[in-house]
Image: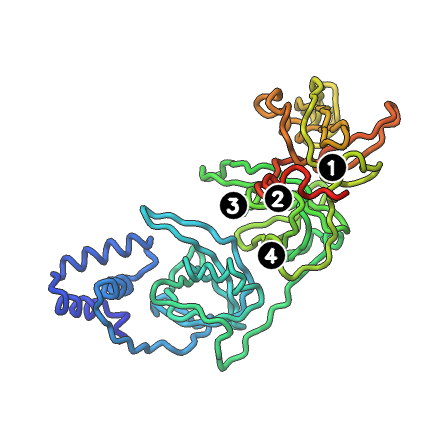
Amino acid sequence: MNILDNKEKIVEKIVSEKGLTKDEIEERIREKVKEYGGLLTEAGAAFSIAKELGVKIDVQTSNNNWVRIKDLKEELGFASVSGVVKMISKVKDWTSGEKSGKVVSLIIDDGTGDIRVTLWNQDAELVNSGKIKLGDIIGIKNAIIKKGQNRLELSVGMRGRVILNPNVEFEIPSLKENIVKINELSADMDGVSVYGRVIRKFEKTTFKREDGSEGKMASIILGDGTANARLVLWGANADYVNEISIGDLIKVENANVKDNQGKIELHLGWKGRIIRNPKDHPDISELFNKEQIDKLKDGDTAVIRATVVKIYPPTQITICPVCGAIVDELCPEHNQGRKTYIVNAELDDGTGVIRGVMFRRIAEKFIGENLDNRLGEELMFYGKVKMNDLFDRKEFIVQDFEYPNPEEEIRGENGDKED
């Protein structure tokens, strides 16, 4: 038996070299297993403690050969597998007591089957740094085999390591990523990747599932020049809404496509992720051009950095929350109605003043807790210029807004403006 699978032999070696009692070591083993949330076996915990105490364990691995995924069994304890990366989740932060780190899940396929692999801390950083990408072939040495909800899973613990482009004797299938333009999306597609720019962001919300547990979701509007689509973010992916900014170029991996009342939506669950400003991307033009107010023309889609110098009293309207129609009280078709607002404000960037018009969700976001607090604020407004023929003036239809980022604050108000 491999000594790494023999807790008793490791304990005996620690006792003989360090003078600790067996009970003391057993207590440390229990604490170590608890610390790692059950991801370490008792033998693995004993090996970890031996390393901490400076006790050298001669390792003669008997499972150094690659195991095909179809042949994995829980009773093996540990195994080394290799495969092509077909899924990468969002890299998440974890905390346990005073310890913290990062964790990410992959799914790899060796042609005989696929399996979920969990990478921790420095191994998870291989994903953050771009050293592990979709389609890469990786090897996992000495991974812990665990029983998941419905199938076996692997976790790369302290004994394990990740090998990029391992030398294996069997053929591993290649992965052709399904990259699709937004105007090509249809409701029968799964596992698609899309490039686009963030046009709008919707705040993260929480909800209760049927089993009483709490979930979270958020959404953004994504555009690639061919069309726009809503991207719905579920679970940990909902946190992306706080990490990306309007105008960012992003890549969405492993999303599913759904039809929502005739509109195509992308949905991103735990099997997908977002890459901000990917290195390899198609040529997607800026959807929002940075403009000065005095240069805005009818039909322009632009972003302006301006100060709110005047706010007009909001106009309250009633809409149907199902179809979005403006109604008197209740929608005749859906028998529902919800109060919302239209807000007009004067926006000044030093080159000119334009009326900003905000509807519904954007108006509610602008009103916030206290509309008076908006007066004098400097914000980045994203939207489209439209000529109001009735009043013979250009208006800026605000699609979203946000505070300038710190880099823009440092550059100052005129830092990015051209003569």
Query: Which is nearer the eye, 261 or 60?
Result: 60
- Work out whether mark 3 precedes mark 4 in sequence or the reverse, and give the earlier one: 3
- Work out whether mark 2 precedes mark 4 in sequence or the reverse, and give the earlier one: 2
Report the amino acid beneath label 4.
Asn
- Indicate the position of residue 44 as horizontal and vertical percent values: 29, 64
Outermost residue on the top side: it is: 313
Residue at 38% x, 64% y is 145
Label 3: state its secondary structure.
Answer: helix
Numbered circle sitting on residue 254:
4
Residue where numbered disc 2 is placed: 245
**Image-quadrant location for residue 393:** top right
Residue at 77% x, 34% y is 293
Numbered circle sitting on residue 235:
3
Numbered circle sitting on residue 383:
1
Label 2: state its secondary structure.
Answer: loop
Q: In this rendering, which labeled residue sits more in front, label 2 or label 3?
A: 2
